[in-house]
Image: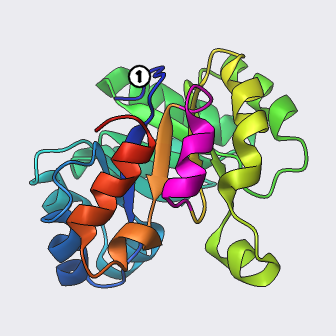
């Protein structure tokens, strides 16, 4: 799943605090490519949430946002059934390297989250040297609320990082009209609220997929 694509895959972020809420949406987004066990869900429900979501038969990313004990937290996520987990790109190189080594040992993936970095392109170069194969450009929920911004401004940066040979995911308030900006510039589009807060999540998924040229 974490490979180069001209038409991005769709990852649905389940940023709930209760497992039943996450399961309800997971059961309705069958056309999505990747299910994300969001950070609030993991903090509230533990790795049990990852195990339950993996039962839907789709690749699962555990958004652990790890910034210490990289190998340990990677192991916890993978033991629970995750196919990928996240580390914060601002973490010490040692944390990222040990998470990557654990992932490689088990045939899994580490995604480095570039949120809050002033020089994401430079950091991406170093991440590649550390063995990272996938990164995420991410405008967090707090930033969206405070500054009224979303991921739509990241298309150019995504393209530059992708030219390094890294798989690039983008996240942050993405809707159908902004998803189009990432065609040929990102490999994975992460969508949360537009789908999870929709009265018709299945239709919302289809709208995103159409914008990505997938339907």
Q: Would you identify the image quadrant in which residue 97 lies?
A: top right
Q: Is residue 121 above or below residue 41?
A: above
Which one is in front, 36 or 89? 36
Q: Quadrant of the N terminus?
A: top left
- Image position, residue 95 (x, y; %): 63, 42
Q: Is residue 77 above or below residue 141?
A: above
Residue at the (41%, 73%) spot, across then down: 15
Please tell me whether mark 1 sits on a helix, a strand or a loop.
helix
Q: Would you identify the image quadrant in which residue 202 lies?
A: bottom left
- State left or right for residue 187 relative to residue 107: right
Q: Is residue 170 above or below residue 184?
A: below
- Circle 1: is it few (<14), some (14-19), or many (20+) Cα within 10 Å? some
Residue at the (44%, 45%) spot, across then down: 211
Which one is in front, 54 or 76? 54
Q: Which residues are magenta?
A: 174-186
- Image position, residue 50 (x, y; %): 25, 59
- Image position, residue 114 (x, y; %): 71, 47
- State left or right for residue 42 relative to residue 114: left
């Amino acid at each position: 799943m974490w490979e180069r694509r001209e038409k991005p895959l769709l990852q649905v972020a389940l940023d709930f605090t209760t497992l039943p809420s996450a399961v309800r949406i997971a059961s309705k987004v069958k056309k999505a490519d990747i299910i994300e066990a969001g950070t609030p869900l993991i903090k509230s429900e533990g790795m049990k949430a990852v195990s339950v979501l993996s039962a839907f038969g789709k690749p699962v990313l555990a958004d652990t946002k790890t910034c210490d004990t990289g190998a340990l937290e990677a192991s916890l996520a993978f033991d629970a059934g995750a196919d990928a987990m996240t580390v914060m790109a601002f973490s010490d190189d040692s944390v990222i390297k040990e998470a990557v080594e654990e992932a490689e040992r088990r045939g899994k993936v580490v995604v480095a989250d570039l949120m809050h970095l002033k020089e994401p392109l430079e950091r991406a170069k170093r991440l590649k040297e550390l063995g990272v194969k996938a990164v995420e450009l991410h405008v967090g929920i707090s930033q969206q609320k405070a500054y009224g911004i979303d991921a739509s401004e990241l298309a150019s940066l995504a393209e530059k990082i992708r030219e390094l040979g890294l798989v690039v995911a983008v996240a942050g308030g993405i809707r159908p009209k902004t998803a189009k900006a990432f065609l040929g510039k990102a490999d994975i589009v992460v969508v949360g609220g537009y789908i999870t807060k929709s009265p018709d999540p299945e239709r919302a998924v289809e709208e995103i997929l159409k914008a990505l040229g997938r339907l």
